[in-house]
Each structure stands twice: as structure tokens, then as C-alpha cells.
Amino acid sequence: MELILRAYNLQLKHTFTISRESIDFQPSLIVELKSDGFSGFGEATSNPYYKTTVPVMMQDLEATRNLIESTENETPEAFWAKIYPYLQHDMFALCALDLAYNDWYARKKGKKLYELWGYSPDKNPMTDYTIGIASIEKMVSKMQELPWPIYKIKLGTQEDIAIVKELRKHTDAIFRIDANCGWGVEETINNAVELKKLGVEFLEQPIRADDWKAHKEVYKHSVLPVIADESCIIEEDVAKCHHYFHGVNVKLVKCGGLTPGKRMIEEAKKLGLRTMVGCMTESTVGISAIAHLLPQLDYVDMDGALLLAQDIATGVTIKNGIIHYSELNGTGVTLI
């Protein structure tokens, strides 16, 4: 098996701002695995919050190159378990590798990934489209630029309720709110009351990740469901979130790929938690991998490629929130 690494700097259509940062470009690593006439593709992006960079990911994958390239016909589960001890310090790199291996394995089996897993896409949820923090006028403009059935609105400003009230004047779409750890307990509980009146479906990670006492208070008193993101990183975190959140947002780059991501979703469903998968402004490479988990999800945020000025791959396509699979096997990705 041959390991190929490609670094990109993905340009965004608009400056993307959340409560803790703003970006115009998103560095990304594409992993390709080639063997037996098939290629599989995976992706992970850099993220300062998780102290992850593309050069570090490349360095860590190079350090495990011999182990990766000696792999022959192992299941994705066996491959992940073999590589995990060497990359457990770099889940983002492990994710890109795991996505590529799952893609390659399914292509070799002659199936789309969701078919290999035995999933039925008949009732797939629609994806939201994210409106990053900006002036109210700019946020309205970005929403009008792309009419959509569900919007995820980034908040964490001094005028959060005013923003949502103004956006509501321009659309009947479902709203989801992501404060990215930017609120306090009373602020969250009070905001939830007003936001519910404005057609908000749920709140995502309003409180800082490690304040479990605060999460419990919000869980007990919020009139809106609260979904964990920064508080749910790896497999062990799903059980921690039970009775502290109403659901979990599984990010593949944070947990180490599709293989552990599937296990996290299964665990969440057993515990009665709502299931969601989110993205990190990946290209269509990473987004196409997420798409194959849709049959197991209540919600999905996989709009990353829609935020780019120019994509680097083809795969799944998204129209008005509905995800359409590629005709190709695996995750359906082809690099442009």
C-alpha cells in the first residue's frame, strides 16, 4: 500500500468568524492510500483550538509510513486498532488516514461505504448551512446569498438575540445556534427562552467544555435541547455527556475517523442521546465521508465545502440541504 500526502490551503468565500477566531483560509491535509488498483481519500484540517497543524499531521504520518504501507487487506477496524497506538496523540492525522482506508476498502469491495455498513439512506437528515459571526447586515446578506431550509448561526457576541431576531425577519428556515463555549449558565438559560420563540431547534455547546457543573445546570433548566461539541471529543466522552447534554456532535477529526465515529454514534443511540456529526470546513473529501453516516444521525452539519471559494474534489453534492451521493464506490471522491 502506498501513502501519498497533499497539503492545501483552502480559501473561503467569506471571512468565517466564531466566538474565538476568524479565518479566510483553511489549511487541509489530504491522505491518499493506493493499492491493488484502487485509491482511497481522507482529509483533516488544521485547528488552533486543538493545537493541530498540517505540518505536524504530515510529520506524524511520515513516522508511521512503514507500518501503514505494510498493511494488506485488513478490515478498517483492524487497521485502525493497529495504527491507533502510534497516532493516538494526533487524532486529526489518524482521522485522515482512517477515512482514506475506509474509502479504499469499500472501493475494493465494489460498494459505496454506506452499503458496506448495511445502512439505508432512505431517511437521511438534511444538512444545515452555517452563518458565521459578522455584522447583522453581513449575516443577513450571507443568509440571503444562499436560501436554505436549516441555518446554523454562530453566536457569542453582545447582541446575540438581536442578531437572531433580525435574521428571523428574512426567512422561515429552522435555526440552530452554536455559541462555541461563549456563554455563561444564566445567559444560556435566558437566551434559550427567547431563542425558542424565534424558531431555534437546539443549542450547540454554549458553555466552555470542561465546566460540567454548568452543563448540568443548563441541562436541567434549558427549554431547548443542548448538543455537546467541544465536550465530546473521543469515545469515552459519550458516556460522560449522558445526563449533561441532550445529544452529541461527533467530529471525525477529533475522535480519529469514521471507525471510532461509528462506535460513538452507536453508544449515543444506546444512551438515548440525539446524534449529530459536524464538520471542520473540510473540502468535499471530508464531507463525502460524513455523508455515509447520515442514516444513523438525527442532525448533520456538513456544509464545509459549500463555504469554500473553490473546492479540490468531487464527491457528494448538496442541494437545498439534501445530500446526493456520488455514483462512485467508497466515499465517492475524486480529486480535481
Image (cartoon, grey):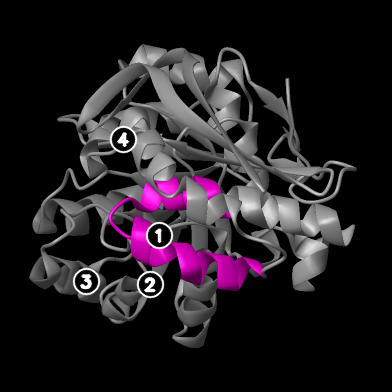
Q: Is residue 163 left or right of residue 120?
A: left
Nearer the viewer's eye, disc 4 or disc 1?
4
Residue 273 drawn at (x, y percent): 44, 76
Q: Which residue is mark 3?
A: 221
State the image quarter where residue 37 is shown. top right
Q: Give the amino acid type for the residue marked by disc 4 in the picture.
A: Val
Query: Which quadrant of the figure contains the C terminus?
Result: top right
Q: Give the amino acid type for the residue marked by disc 3 in the picture.
A: His
- The Cα–Cα distance between marks 2 and 4, rounded to whole angstroms, is 23 Å
**Quick one: label 3, few (<14), some, or many (20+) residues within 10 Å?**
some
Note whether 246 is above or below 33 in the view shown. below
Q: Judging from the image, what secondary structure is the residue with disc 3 in?
A: helix
Note whether 31 is above or below 196 in the view shown. above
Which residue range is magenta in the image? 75-98
Note whether 245 is above or below 114 in the view shown. below
**Mark linked to residue 235:** 2
Q: Is residue 279 left or right of residue 57?
A: right
**Quick one: label 2, few (<14), some, or many (20+) residues within 10 Å?**
many
At horizontal 48% and vertical 46% (from top left) the residue drawn is: 65
- The Cα–Cα distance between marks 3 and 2, rounded to whole angstroms, is 27 Å
Q: Judging from the image, what secondary structure is the residue with disc 4 in?
A: helix
**Mark linked to residue 255:** 1
State the image quarter where residue 154 is shown. top left
Q: Are marks 3 and 4 in contact (CB under 8 Å)?
A: no
Q: Is residue 307 left or right of residue 247?
A: right
Observer-nearest of 59 and 267: 59
Q: Are marks 3 and 2 in contact (CB under 8 Å)?
A: no
Q: Judging from the image, what secondary structure is the residue with disc 2 in?
A: loop
